[in-house]
Image (cartoon, coloured by chain):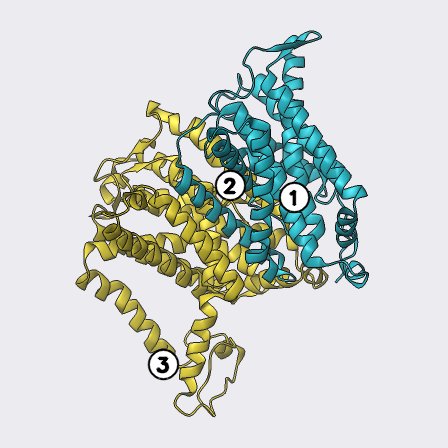
Chain colours: A yellow, B cyan
Amino acid sequence: MSSVWMPCGDYHQSYAEDHGWWQTRFIKFKMLLLLAVIFVIIPQFLSGYVMSVASMVGYTAMGALGVQLLIGYTGLVTLGHAAFIAVGAYTSTLLVLQFPWPQWIMDAGLAYPISVLVAGVFGGIWSVLFGLPSAKVKGFYLILTTMAAQFITVDFILTQYVSRIGGRGQAFSLPPGTIKVGPWVIDSEREVYYLMAVILTLMVIVLANLLRSRVGRAWVAIRDNDIAAETLGINIVWYKLLAFFVAGFFAGVAGGFWVSNTAALSPEHFPWFWSLWLVGVILIGGVGSIHGAIFGSFFMVVIMELLQVGVIPLADYFPKLLMSFASLKEMAFGLAICAFLIYEPNGLAYRWWQAKNYFNLWPFSY
Amino acid sequence: MEIFSMTLITGIMVGGIYALVALGWVLIYKCSGVLNLAMGELTLIGAYVTLSFYEAGIPFVPAVVLTLLVGVVLGVLTERIFLDKLIGEPILTVIMVTVGLSFFLKGLVGFVWGYDTRVFEPPVFSLSPITIGFVKISPVYLWSFILAIVLLIIFVAFFKYTRWGLSMQATADDETAALSLGVSARFVYAAAWAIAFMSAGVGGALLGNINGINISVGYLGLLVLPAVVLGGLNSIPGAIVGGIIIGVLQNLSGTYLDQYFPGGVKEIMPFAFMAVFLLFKPYGLWGWERIERV
């Protein structure tokens, strides 16, 4: 990990140390502090509105982590990630609503957690299905097959067939109290927030661990030069499909989580816009780092909230602004992506890294 | 048989419009290497600009000509503001800038013109069908096709025979050599974007005549992507053939598959076909096969 600066005179003496999680005591302290903030301080002291925004950040970050894995670490550009999130959300909902669970599972509140795991597996398999062309094509052609995944899954299969199961028409409604994890019913911002924090933390741990293992190094090798990677003995088709599976799994779990955050599920929650949004998030956050996915989600969600807050006072004078806020949001998002790519191509994660380096040597930076 | 031939002919006529838009896409890609995902939004803008001129009382053909002029201005502006700075950047960066651009343009269209479906009022083409031989087709398709083909021929002739077109061809072939012969790359890129805006704009105006104009015209513009992939990314004949194939495929599947898979089979069939097609011919019909070395 080249991003860690060791104190002067300290050296790693084994590879295990070199790859260790917490290489200095400061890092350990910092990460524990972060966990404390996430799990104790935010839910205890901040309002429900802040927590709902935080849950949105978390949901975006869950999707963005999968996209980051595909684009930032394996070099497979995907523009159809919302499809896999949608598959996860629908799997989870259908399982919770329609599957004949044994009574003891219902009593123990395990139905929803199990359904989220199954949703992850389903999302992964679906993602591998559309990742299969990556064995043969790459670059722009691959982008188009992932786009095809989006249109086939969301606009066709989900809208036309899956949504009609049970004769509900367009949306599945989730009555309050359906979503239960163990003894807790997920029905307020606070519970949704806790669920989000747990899932996101687990995802980050899983992804970070994968990336510092053999699998992660193979992915990075494929990203940097796939032909060279193949000559080194990496089975690139297998590893590409594995990347698709893991990203699809994350997407499926994210979809399963989204079910807890909404009262009714419809295909409109997963438009192509959302796939592009996730890619935009990692571009703004920084391609090729886990920090990037999280910074990007934070930045985009908070900026959009601020935009909304900023537009409301103007609405008295220009009512059109609020009416077509969706358009305004799209314009702002488009401009943000263009501006970041042109003027700040390394994203927010790079600035974070620079700031960290500056303070590492501060105040004696010579 | 009559249904089949009617579907086929309608497909070819709609395909002509796709071919026109696809030509614009391929020109950008050939000249500057930019893979443009904003084509749908360019189509959308063209449709609305034509509609605005038409509603201001200008007849349809002059309105289309004015749209071409607006297209030139917008194309050059887009190239100068957004894409000029990205020459030589990685492919993902450039693609995503066009995605950002597409968001921006879509938001702009929604903001200025709203989301309701609008139609050309009074209708540009008469509604009673014309009979040619034994098939009946509506004049909208016929005239759109003719206009699309005329523009297609003009663009291809421009590309082949004029000095500007030749300099664009030279840049597409070998950029460094073209630069050393005194071709201005900046001019060529700007010209490519201008042509793309023009072709997409007219395509949008014609498509808008068929079904009315709303945000989904942008989706029709997106169908250009399967078309260019089928033809191979850097082949102009490929773009034309691909556009027509997509048009035919779309209409045939709408007619024949809809009874088995009710719903939007017509919309997704081009993408599904393309995904399968790529498994067998990864470079399209006439695209350059890139041989990669470490």
Subunit of label 3: A
Give the quadrant of the N terminus of chain B. top right
Q: Residue at x 46, y 25 (%)?
A: B119
Q: Secondary structure at mark 2?
A: helix
In the image: residue A126, left or right of residue A170 = right
Q: Secondary structure at mark 1?
A: helix
Q: What label does residue A126 carry, if any?
A: 2
In the image: residue B127, left or right of residue A37 = right
The residue pinned by badge 1 equals B195
Q: Earlier in the sequence, mark 2 or mark 3?
A: 3
Q: Secondary structure at mark 3?
A: helix
Residue B58, percent across and down?
Answer: 52, 29
Residue A95, percent across and down?
Answer: 35, 36
Subunit of label 2: A
Label 1 environment density (alpha carbons within 10 Å; few <14, some 14–19, many ≥20): many
Residue B230, percent across and down?
Answer: 69, 37
Farthest residue in the front direction?
B57
Callouts 1 and 2 close, C-beta under 8 Å? no
Q: How far is disc 1 from disc 2 in space, using C-alphas? A: 39 Å
Q: Residue at x 26, y 51 (%)?
A: A314
Farthest residue in the top direction?
B134
At label 1, the amino acid type is: Ile
Residue A247, percent across and down?
Answer: 49, 51
The residue pinned by badge 3 equals A26
* Callout 1 and callout 2 share a chain: no
Q: Residue at x 36, y 81 (%)?
A: A26
